[in-house]
Image: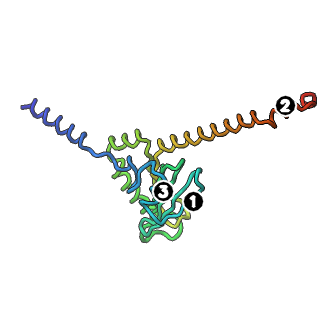
Amino acid sequence: MTKQLCVLITFMALVNIGGAEDPAILKGYGKTEWGQTLAEVQEILPGGKVEGQEGSPQAYLLEGSEPMVGANCRFINDQLFAVSVAFQLPNRPENGPDPEGFRLIQGKINEKYFKTKESKHLLSVAGIQIRVEQKSGSGGKITVNYTNVTLYREAKAAVMEAKREKAEEADKAMLESERFKELGEVEGIDEAL
């Protein structure tokens, strides 16, 4: 009987672990997915305003109404890597922070994403950071920042590599230019140096 009970408990534990659903934030925020292009996010969430130029970090700003008053989708190398969601809760202080609202939002984030060691581990391994913040003088605004740090680092490395390659190509083209070759033959430079 004891052996059967141990087998049953072990089986139930494995079913619960195997059946546990990964946090949706691992794939993206809301209807968006990490790595989507600005155009794809604009199609999913129309009506926002783009800040920044193509080829540089960009933001896609969306307005909302209480309690969620806005969202900021951030892109690097045309890949969504972060979403910040701003809240202003009812009866908040007119000036300064909203400590009750902050505590409520922080508690809900902890309950949703950090309740178990497994979900904390999954977020850590995936490189997903979730932070709640409020700034003084923000009219009680509370911001939740969701960031895919892994994707950000990979995209930034790709941007830096592309810049390095472009600089190398420009340098090579200059060294091979006729003018550069002609300048190397100008008399008097070596002596003046």
Query: What scheme was used to colour the molecule?
Result: rainbow
* Residue drawn 93% across the image and 31% down it: 188
- Tag nearer the camera, 1 or 2: 2
* Sooner in the amino-acid sequence: mark 3 or mark 2: 3
The type of residue carrying mark 3 is Ala
- Spot occupied by residue 17 in the image (x, y as percentages of width and height): 25, 40
Mark 1 lies on residue: 51
* Residue drawn 79% across the image and 36% down it: 178
Separation (CA) of disc 3 from disc 2: 49 Å
The type of residue carrying mark 1 is Glu
Provide the secondary structure element on which disc 3 rests.
helix
* Sooner in the amino-acid sequence: mark 3 or mark 1: 3
* Residue furthest to the front: 178
Mark 3 lies on residue: 39
Mark 2 lies on residue: 184
Q: Quadrant of the C terminus?
A: top right
Provide the secondary structure element on which disc 2 rests.
loop
